[in-house]
Image: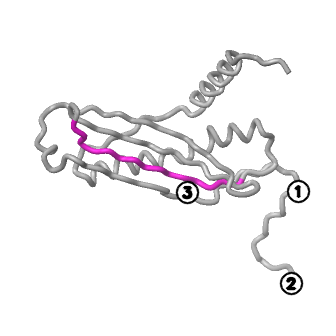
Amino acid sequence: MSDETNAPATPAAAPEGTPMFQIQRMYLKDLSLEQPNSPGIFTEQSQSQVDINLTLGFEAVSEGIYEVTVTATVNTHVGDRTMFLIEAKQAGVFEIRNVPAQQLDGLLGIVCPQMIYPYVRAIVSDVCSRACFPPVILAEVNFQALYEAQKAQQAQQAAAAPQTLN
């Protein structure tokens, strides 16, 4: 008989300086629904127009801890009358340590939003249904392409900015 126990092995602590990426929490940060023309709008027979706006944001909460947000704004209207307006802001708190600045920017602008976005899609669809409107299904988003386009636009603006001599 041996003195060994069958206790589960605990993972060894990561060596100092090892890159770390970890989800701490995902949560619904803000949600609003407006139906300014209800109940009259329910009798409208005209085709509705749907405008969707998606915004991303992030901020450092503390050393190595970042909050990333994805906000979807859905404005559905018939003519100039609003049927409904939904704004859903889903957030995630991520621990990111020992990552070079260029990679950190990509994690915050691509990887984190990709993880958060499915939650926003589900929330928007669910709120539409609960408000007695047909669900709005947000399209898939290529966050890599958005990130690269944003970086190209920033580089173009920097190149076009007047240079000053000191």
Q: CA distance from mark 3 to mark 1?
A: 27 Å
Q: Earlier in the sequence, mark 3 or mark 1?
A: 1
Q: CA distance from mark 3 to mark 2?
A: 47 Å
Q: Earlier in the sequence, mark 3 or mark 2?
A: 2
Residue that label 1 marks? 15
**Residue 133, horizontal then vertical, whole percent:** 23, 46
Which residue sits at x=63%, y=26%? Answer: 148
* Residue 67 inside the magenta-drawn segment: no
Amino acid type, mark 3: Met
User: Would you call the spot at circle 2 few (<14 residues within 10 Å), some (14-19), or many (20 or more)?
Assistant: few
Mark 3, secondary structure of its residue: strand
Vertical placement of residue 157 versus 38, above or below:
above
User: Would you call the spot at circle 1 few (<14 residues within 10 Å), some (14-19), or many (20 or more)?
Assistant: few
**Start-end of magenta stretch:** 81-95
Residue that label 2 marks? 1
Please tell me whether the stretch drawn in magenta is mainly helix, strand or loop: strand
Vertical placement of residue 67 versus 6, above or below:
above
**Residue 59, horizontal then vertical, whole percent:** 65, 49
Q: Is residue 144 left or right of residue 84?
A: right
Vertical placement of residue 82 versus 95, above or below:
above
Q: CA distance from mark 2 to mark 1?
A: 35 Å
Residue that label 3 marks? 26
Mark 1, secondary structure of its residue: loop
**Residue 4, horizontal then vertical, whole percent:** 85, 79
Which residue sits at x=19%, y=46%? Answer: 37
Amino acid type, mark 1: Pro
